[in-house]
């Protein structure tokens, strides 16, 4: 792996604001001089993920993850160190230089990065064909405009494309761009028979004669395509009958972790502007075209918990707008418990049956006004579920009511908040026409009998760690002091013998290393610690310590206390050994009492000696 120049990494750190890096993945709110939001590394409902832009670090007080811009990109995008730096350099226009002056060769680029590049190339290629004058482009533009009633500008905005029915021009393009065979085999855009030699002839395109809709991940990178069947789709297409064909799952595409248009919608949600979940990509595009910019769609599969957790990072309110007569309504019942568990507030928009409209038609005919109308009669999650489970509550028998109640309990029990559950039960009572108090008693009985599954008690919120906590090695405090009070660090380096430090844990190993730097006058400053950090655990610890400058009235006193602790820990065991030996010396002839007595008085003197730190400027 070629070495990236350390100056380059330093440059990147000073020029890129960590808030901009994290904001691509999580929504942050300003809190004093810092920012906080929902943690992208664990599932949570109240924000414990903090970002400190001054120090360029983040820390989650819920799951403990911490790090800097590079760790963040590595962990959220699954990249290695160099790839993360390259990605950041590209994103923030910071040139990346390598030690030997050369960039990574094709072979050294990761497969994932190649797959991202390949999809970008493919999206551009399909889109250019769509725009170009030629049989495929002409036909598809007319289809888009006249049959689908979409504007050509929308096609530009979303890079809508066409896959040619017969030619393999994409194959020619990617072969010319020298993508690796591995990437071509794994990208899902081609069929390449096992064992066959890579050539234009052996590389068979998966998508032919179809409308190509690029699928982007939540960071806006093209990771897959949805291909809609058209009259151009050739008869020998193995998936000829399928209206929509999706890319298969690849190292960069997992259907269940992706929502169409989330990359754009997440920047548009806010107070009074919830996510609107629609059934398909074209529904989401239609919504966008009429100005409803928060629409998202699952990837032609049922909605997964992963998708809901992803949504929850950006906004809690989701309106579901599915075809009224479709399986979507039933699917909603299956996903409701997951949504409540994820802490989402769900409402359902339904079209009255008489209109025989689907959301697409409604948007097309009435624009955003149609949405505003439907929204006025939006139903709560429980009202919707009750309606689906027991459509005619007014004429239901007590047995039917009891069965329906039980089905609703299964859903309500998924919500973790007691307040939310009580609210849901009240809504359910209203919908089932039952007295709320009675239904709540039944629900409690249902839970006592074990409920659907036992919900883990929510873990207590983690408190912000104080600089001084029992059970933490004294090296930890000393390390904190070194990081934030350079002068004290320098002073410590002159009084702490290296063998007092317990280097069996990261804090000790780092303290030992840092003090050596101070001692030699080579302390690089907190911004440039990278070369001194050897393991992930060390990097994480440093990010976490840098995160919150401690508020200490007397840091020197804390340093001396820490010093005292490591001195006691280093010297006392030997003192006890000596005392034991002296007590036994009459029965053990190998013991020399005089040297032991001398050593004991030395140790006792050392332990009594007041610790002082020389004043260092
Ligand atoms: Zn976390």
Image (cartoon, rainbow, N blue to C red):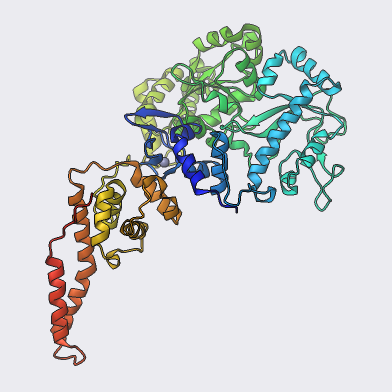
Which residue is at a point 65% across and 24% down the rendered structure image? 280
Which residue is at a point 44% across and 43% down the rendered structure image? 68
Q: Quadrant of the N terminus?
A: bottom right
Q: Quadrant of residue 418?
A: top left
Please provide percent x and percent y for residue 233. Answer: 83, 27
Decide which of 172, 183 is in the foreground and name it: 172
Q: How many marks?
A: 0
Question: Ligand 1 sits in which quadrant?
Answer: top left
Which residue is at a point 41% across and 24% down the rendered structure image? 424
Please provide percent x and percent y for residue 141. Answer: 78, 17
Which residue is at a point 47% across and 30% down the rendered structure image? 312
Residue 535 shows up from this direction? yes
Residue 579 shows up from this direction? no
Q: Quadrant of residue 217?
A: top right
Q: Is residue 92 left or right of residue 231?
A: left
Q: Is residue 574 left or right of residue 322?
A: left
Vertical position of residue 21 compared to residue 397: above or below = below
Please provide percent x and percent y for residue 423. Answer: 38, 23
Vertical position of residue 60 compared to residue 604: above or below = above
Q: Is residue 357 left or right of residue 407?
A: right
Outermost residue, bottom side: 589
Decide which of 10, 203 is in the foreground and name it: 10
Q: Is residue 582 left or right of residue 259?
A: left
Please provide percent x and percent y for residue 268. Answer: 51, 20
Decide which of 569, 387 is in the foreground and name it: 569
């Amino acid at each position: 792996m070629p070495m990236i120049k350390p100056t380059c990494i330093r440059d990147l750190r000073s020029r890129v604001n960590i808030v901009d890096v994290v904001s691509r993945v999580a929504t942050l709110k300003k809190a004093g001089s810092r920012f906080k939001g929902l943690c992208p590394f664990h599932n949570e409902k109240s924000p414990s993920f903090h970002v400190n832009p001054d120090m360029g670090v983040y820390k989650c007080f819920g799951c403990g993850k911490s790090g800097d811009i590079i760790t963040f990109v590595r962990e959220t995008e699954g990249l290695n160190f160099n790839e993360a730096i390259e990605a950041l350099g590209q994103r923030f226009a910071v040139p990346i230089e390598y030690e030997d002056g050369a960039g990574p060769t094709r072979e050294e680029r990761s497969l994932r990065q190649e797959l991202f590049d390949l999809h970008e190339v493919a999206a551009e290629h399909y889109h250019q064909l769509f725009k170009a004058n030629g049989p495929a482009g002409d036909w598809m533009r007319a289809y888009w405009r006249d049959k689908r009633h979409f504007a050509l500008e929308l096609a530009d905005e979303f890079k809508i494309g066409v896959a040619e029915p017969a030619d393999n021009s994409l194959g020619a393009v990617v072969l010319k761009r020298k993508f690796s065979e591995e990437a071509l085999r794994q990208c899902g855009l081609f069929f390449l028979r096992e064992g066959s030699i890579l050539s234009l002839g052996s590389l068979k395109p998966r998508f032919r004669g179809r409308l190509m809709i690029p699928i982007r991940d939540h960071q806006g990178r093209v990771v897959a395509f949805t291909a809609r069947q058209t009259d151009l789709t050739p008869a020998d297409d193995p998936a000829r009958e399928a209206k929509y064909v999706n890319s298969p799952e690849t190292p960069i595409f997992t259907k269940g972790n992706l929502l169409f248009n989330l990359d754009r919608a997440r920047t548009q949600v806010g107070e009074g502007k919830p996510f609107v979940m629609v059934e398909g990509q074209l529904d989401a595009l239609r919504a966008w075209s009429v100005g409803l910019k928060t629409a998202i769609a699952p990837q032609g599969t049922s909605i997964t918990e992963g998708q809901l957790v992803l949504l929850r990072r950006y906004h809690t309110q989701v309106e579901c707008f599915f075809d009224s007569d479709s399986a979507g309504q039933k699917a909603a019942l299956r996903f409701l418990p997951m949504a409540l568990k994820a802490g989402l507030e769900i409402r359902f928009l339904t079209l009255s049956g008489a209109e025989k409209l689907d959301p697409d038609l409604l948007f097309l005919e009435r624009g955003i006004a149609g949405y505003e109308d439907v929204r006025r009669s939006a139903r709560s999650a429980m009202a919707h579920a009750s309606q689906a489970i027991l459509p005619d509550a007014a004429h239901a028998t007590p047995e039917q009511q009891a069965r329906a109640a039980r089905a609703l309990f299964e859903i309500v029990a998924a919500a973790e908040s007691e307040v939310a559950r009580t609210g849901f039960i009240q809504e359910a009572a209203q919908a089932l026409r039952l007295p709320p108090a009675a239904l709540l008693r039944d629900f409690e009985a249902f839970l006592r009998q074990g409920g659907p599954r036992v919900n883990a008690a929510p873990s207590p919120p983690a408190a912000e760690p104080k600089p001084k906590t029992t059970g933490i090695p004294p090296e930890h405090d000393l390390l904190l002091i070194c990081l934030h009070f350079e002068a004290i660090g320098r002073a410590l380096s002159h009084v702490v013998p290296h063998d007092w430090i317990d280097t069996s844990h990261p804090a000790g190993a780092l303290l030992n290393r840092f003090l050596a730097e101070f001692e030699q006058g080579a302390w690089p400053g907190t911004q440039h610690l990278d070369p001194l950090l050897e393991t992930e655990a060390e990097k994480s610890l440093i990010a976490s310590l840098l995160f919150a400058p401690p508020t200490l009235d007397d840091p020197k006193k804390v340093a001396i206390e820490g010093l005292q602790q490591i001195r006691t820990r280093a010297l006392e065991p030997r003192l006890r050994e000596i005392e034991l030996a002296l007590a036994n010396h009459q029965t053990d002839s190998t013991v020399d009492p005089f040297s032991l007595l001398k050593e004991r008085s030395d140790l006792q003197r050392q332990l009594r000696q007041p610790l002082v730190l020389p004043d260092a400027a």
